[in-house]
Amino acid sequence: QAAPPPYGQAPSAEPQYGQPQVGQPPYGQPPYGQQDYGQPQYAAPPPAPSPYGQVPYPANPYAAYPGTATDLERRPSGVTVACLTAIVLSSITALLMLLGLFGVLASRDAVEDEMMKNSDFRELDISAGDVIAVVTVVLVVLIIWSLITVLLGVLTMRRSNVARILLVVSSAVVALLSLVGITSVFTAIWLLGGITVIVLLFIGDASRWFSRKPPSSSPGYLQY
């Protein structure tokens, strides 16, 4: 135990061994106002704003505009009507030509006899067998052509631009042949059908849909 100071003297300000000084934290604790080792001294800086005050584009440009991607994938009604018109008319043509082919092949002998009885036909110096052969080939070609057109209509509805071009060419040929050989209302139906298919595959949003471009009037359309 330390001896008390003499009478009249102030106690010494020097701390004894093992005692902390005034204002000094205990042993093992950091000084006042300083953080422990390993703890961040400053908060993370806020993210820097984008240049020119613009918000960066999202990874998906259509994500911020609901419905735009759906509008891009939706088939225009004109394309649907054109394809269905081509499919229906081509199916009817294939069925009629198939029935005509069966009729010619089933009554071949009777058709030849009727042709030979005609005096005008005998003057042409053409055999009835050759005429029936030509008619058979024409009917087969029309059947194949009609079936291909049905396939083109299906592929066009599935957004094939190549099928669309081929379907337009086929419809143009049908319209031209119907116009040249128009003799009845039945032929006029095919003429109007061919023109309808050609027009509907190019008007409205048809070209945009086949090229897979977003509509310019859509709020999600981004121009660069």
Image (spheres, grey):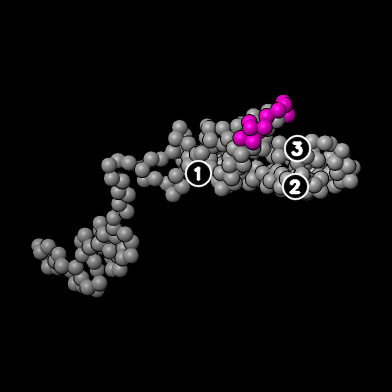
Can residue 129 be spotted in the picture? yes
Q: Residue at x 53, y 42 (%)?
A: 210
Callout count: 3
Q: Which of marks 3 and 2 is nearer the N terminus?
A: 3
**Magenta extent:** 176-186
Q: Which residue is drawn at 53% across and 35% down?
A: 202
Task: Give the CA distance from mark 1 to mark 2.
Answer: 42 Å
Q: Which amino acid type is marked by label 3?
A: Ile
Vertical placement of residue 134 versus 17, above or below: above
Q: Mark 1 points at which residue?
A: 211
Q: In which quarter of the image is residue 189?
A: top right
Mark 3 element type: helix
Crowd class of label 1 (few under 14; some 14 to 19; many from 20; radius 10 Å): few
Q: Earlier in the sequence, mark 1 or mark 2?
A: 2
Q: Residue at x 67, y 44 (%)?
A: 149
Q: Mark 3 points at which residue?
A: 92
Mark 2 element type: helix
Crowd class of label 3 (few under 14; some 14 to 19; many from 20; radius 10 Å): few
Q: Which amino acid type is marked by label 2?
A: Val
Comparing 35 with 169, the one in front is 169
Task: Give the CA distance from mark 3 to mark 2.
Answer: 22 Å
Q: Which amino acid type is marked by label 1?
A: Ser
Q: Mark 2 points at which residue?
A: 134
Q: Mark 1 near mark 3, Cβ–Cβ under 8 Å? A: no
Q: Which of marks 1 and 3 is nearer the N terminus?
A: 3
Residue 46 lies, in percent from the top left, at: 31, 49
Comparing 48 with 132, the one in front is 132
The residue positioned farthest toward the top in the image shown: 185
